[in-house]
Each structure stands twice: as structure tokens, then as C-alpha cells.
């Protein structure tokens, strides 16, 4: 039976999204078993997922609901192509499966909207192995101390500490894959069911899934000069860091082979819970950070450090999205940052329906009427399943 035929089983306003997802696979499936198809190719849902590291799969199975056989769609990276060792620590908070009432309420909320804006936070990427900040398994709870904007600007030592950690962890950071939530959002955008996406994240997983969100807090994938404003690709900057620090480049290669020999790995060792730790005695003086090759200015990643304001033009664009929508959905954000919570309030005060899906409390629980405690990928897959 053709996959498109199953779209009639979905809520009418969400049929198109499921059809779009199905059209990215082959024309038919075996009805007696689960089958996985790569989502790639020019006619597929995600034309940007052409490189092997970004290929994702759609798994189609079946369940019986009230005696009627219906398809179950699951989205995610192919088996055996998960994130690398630095992201293998447990980062997805525990959550009971969403109730049928939760699924029904979220489906109704999305189905009744004509101009839906979605705001995503770090909680949407935990299912890709990227830790959040404030969740039960977040970075802050593990003792991680985030870099502040003031510290980065004022201290060359702080900049060296940041860039050595970024250099060592870059390959692991970029190895993360979009998960089912990212892919479901991209499909709903393509089907016209989501009008705009705003993200607080700088991991570009939305982009890898086929979306083009407004990046409220910037992106890790660009580097900018604080003096002249020139922008560099972070991937290319990684090569510059290697050229300036050949011993460190060799240390990363040695780490893959030897594991934890500090003499050979330049003070880099693996934490027991996953991730990498770097001995300060090795990087404090010897790690070299290149300056801007246009003006010799200081280079900074193009995302917001703690204490840094959202650029006005970007904030104004986000506010206009919030005020112009008829429904505003928050996915995976605690809304602790003022820039994010202000958007929800702006939408609410403009008369839009508002809803939150997040594990844990948020800064907008007091006035948002629909709050669902769930993993994002799990509930979105259920919303599209039925």
C-alpha cells in the first residue's frame, strides 16, 4: 500500500505533513514488518541531508488502535551512526510517555492554527545527545561553568580556555544528528503547518533537518571579528587552529588511539561520564589563538555568551513573528532567558494561543494555559502518527 494512502488516517490539518514525510521514502512499504528508508535525494523531504553524516531514517511500523491497523512513523539517525563519544553521557531527562490527552491537546492546538510560530530551546536537542543547561541532566548541574561575555572580552586567558575546549570538542559537537523532533518540525514547515521557527540553539540541527530558523542566540558555525566584523566559517577556522597548534592537532589523533596517556594527548583525557577534560597546565601558555587576518582583531564565536544581549535587529524580527502569529508553541525551553520569555508574553498579549512542551518548570507557566511534560520527539511523533 502506498505511504501517501495513510495520510487519510491523520487529523485533516496534519495530513499534508505526514504525506510530505512519506514522500521522502520509496513508493511502498511492506505491511507486515518495520522498514527503514534513508531520507535523501532531490525529491525528498530534506534535500540538505545529502552527506552521509546527515542521513536520517523514517521507520514505518504498525499498531492497532480500536481494532484498526494504523501506521507508526519514527524518525531518527540510522542505527550505528549515533553521536560520538563526547556526547554519550546521559543527557535526555526522564519523562513518562505523553498521555493520549496530551497528544490530543497538542494536535488540536496545532490543527486550529493558521499562523503557528514555534520557539525551540536546548531541550529539543537532548535527544540528539547534546546536553541542555538547566535540565535534570544539564551542564550546569554537572559543574560546567559557562563563559560570560565580559570574561571573554577582558581576558586573553579566558579566550584561550574557550578556544582550546572548542578546538578539542569540535568534531564531537558537529557529529550530532537531527532527531525526530527536528525532522517533524521541518516536515510541518514544508507542509505549511508551521509558519516560522525561532531557536535559542546554536547547534544548527534544525538546518541539518531542512529548516531555516531565526537563530535568536546566534550560531556556533560562524566566527566573527569583534573589531572589523569580518565573518569566518567555523569549519575553516578549525583548520587555522590546527595550523597554529600542530602539537594539539597531533594530540587529538593520539587520543583516538591511546585513550588517556596525558604525555601523548597534551593533557586531554576522557571523563568517566563522557566528554573531554583538558589539563590547564598544558594549554595555559602554549595554545595559540589566531587573530583576524583582515585587521588582527579578536575573534569570537558568533553566538551569545552569558550576559550578552540579542542584537536589536534580530530581537525585533523575533518580536514581530510573535506578535503576528495566531499560535505560539514553545518546545524544550525553560524560558529562563528574558529574550525567550518576552516572546511568549508578546504573543500571549497579542491574543495568540500559547502552549509549552518541556520537561520541568518554565518561566511562563503562570500564564500559558497548555503545558505538557514530555520529550519533544516522542510527542511530535505521536501527533503525526494518528
Image: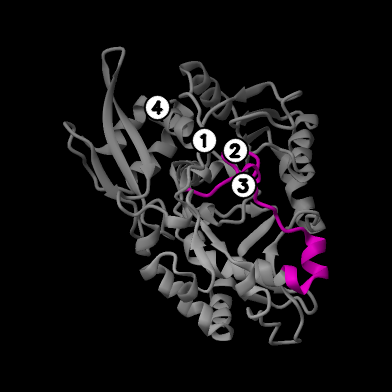
Tag 4, which secondary structure? loop
The residue under the point 66% across, 82% down is: 290
Is the residue under label 1 in contact with that under label 4 (CB below 8 Å)?
no
The prevailing secondary structure element of the residues shown in magenta is loop
Per the image, the residue denoted by label 4 is 10
Magenta-tinted stretch: 129-158
Is label 1 in contact with label 2 (beta carbons under 8 Å)?
yes
Say which label, 4 or 1, has the lower sequence index.
4
Q: Could you classify mark 4 by the number of other residues whose Cα lies within 10 Å: few (under 14), some (14-19), or many (20 or more)?
A: some
The residues tagged by marks 3 and 2 sit, at their Cα atoms, a distance apart of 15 Å
Mark 2: secondary structure: loop
Q: Which residue is mark 3?
A: 139
Which residue has dot 2 on it? 332
The reply, left or right, for residue 327 in relation to residue 191 is right
Q: Secondary structure at mark 3?
A: loop
Which is closer to the viewer, label 4 or label 1? 1
What is the spatial separation of the Cα atoms under label 2 and label 4, in whole angstroms? 25 Å
Q: CA distance from mark 1 to mark 2?
A: 7 Å
Amino acid at each position: 500500500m502506498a505511504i501517501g494512502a495513510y495520510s487519510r488516517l491523520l487529523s485533516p490539518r496534519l495530513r499534508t505533513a505526514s504525506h510530505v514525510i512519506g514522500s521522502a521514502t520509496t513508493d511502498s512499504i511492506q505491511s507486515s514488518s518495520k522498514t527503514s528508508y534513508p531520507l535523501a535525494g532531490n525529491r525528498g523531504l530534506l534535500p540538505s541531508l545529502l552527506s552521509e553524516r546527515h542521513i536520517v531514517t523514517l521507520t514505518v511500523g504498525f499498531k492497532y488502535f480500536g481494532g484498526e491497523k494504523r501506521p507508526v512513523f519514527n524518525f531518527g539517525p540510522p542505527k550505528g551512526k549515533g553521536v560520538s563519544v563526547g556526547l554519550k553521557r546521559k543527557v535526555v531527562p526522564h519523562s513518562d510517555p505523553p498521555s493520549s490527552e496530551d497528544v490530543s491537546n497538542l494536535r488540536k492546538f496545532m490543527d486550529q492554527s493558521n499562523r503557528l510560530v514555534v520557539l525551540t530551546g536546548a531541550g529539543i536537542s537532548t535527544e540528539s545527545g547534546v546536553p541542555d543547561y538547566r535540565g535534570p541532566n544539564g551542564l550546569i548541574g554537572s559543574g560546567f561553568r559557562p563563559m560570560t561575555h565580559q570574561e571573554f572580552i577582558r581576558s586573553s586567558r579566558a579566550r584561550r580556555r574557550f578556544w582550546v575546549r572548542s578546538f578539542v570538542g569540535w568534531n564531537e559537537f558537529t557529529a550530532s544528528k537531527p532527531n525526530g523532533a527536528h525532522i517533524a518540525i521541518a516536515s510541518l514547515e514544508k507542509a505549511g503547518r508551521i509558519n516560522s521557527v525561532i531557536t535559542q540553539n546554536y547547534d544548527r540541527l534544525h538546518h541539518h533537518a531542512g529548516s531555516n530558523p531565526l537563530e535568536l542566540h546566534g550560531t556556533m558555525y560562524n566566527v566573527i571579528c569583534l573589531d572589523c566584523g569580518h565573518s569566518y566559517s567555523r569549519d575553516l577556522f578549525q583548520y587555522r587552529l590546527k595550523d597554529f597548534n600542530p602539537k594539539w592537532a597531533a594530540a587529538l589523533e593520539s587520543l583516538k588511539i591511546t585513550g588517556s596517556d596525558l604525555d601523548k594527548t597534551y593533557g586531554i583525557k576522557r571523563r568517566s561520564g563522557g566528554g573531554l577534560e583538558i589539563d590547564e597546565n598544558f594549554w595555559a601558555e602554549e595554545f595559540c589563538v589566531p587573530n583576524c587576518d583582515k585587521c588582527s582583531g579578536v575573534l569570537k564565536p558568533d553566538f551569545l555568551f552569558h550576559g550578552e544581549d540579542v542584537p536589536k535587529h534580530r530581537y525585533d524580527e523575533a518580536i514581530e513573528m510573535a506578535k503576528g502569529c495566531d499560535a505560539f508553541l514553545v518546545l524544550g525551553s525553560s524560558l529562563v532567558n528574558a529574550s525567550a520569555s518576552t516572546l511568549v508574553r508578546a504573543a500571549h498579549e497579542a491574543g495568540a494561543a500559547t502552549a509549552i512542551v518541556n520537561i520541568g518548570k518554565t518561566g511562563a507557566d503562570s500564564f500559558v494555559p497548555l503545558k505538557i511534560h514530555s520529550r519533544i520527539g516522542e510527542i511530535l511523533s505521536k501527533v503525526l502518527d494518528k
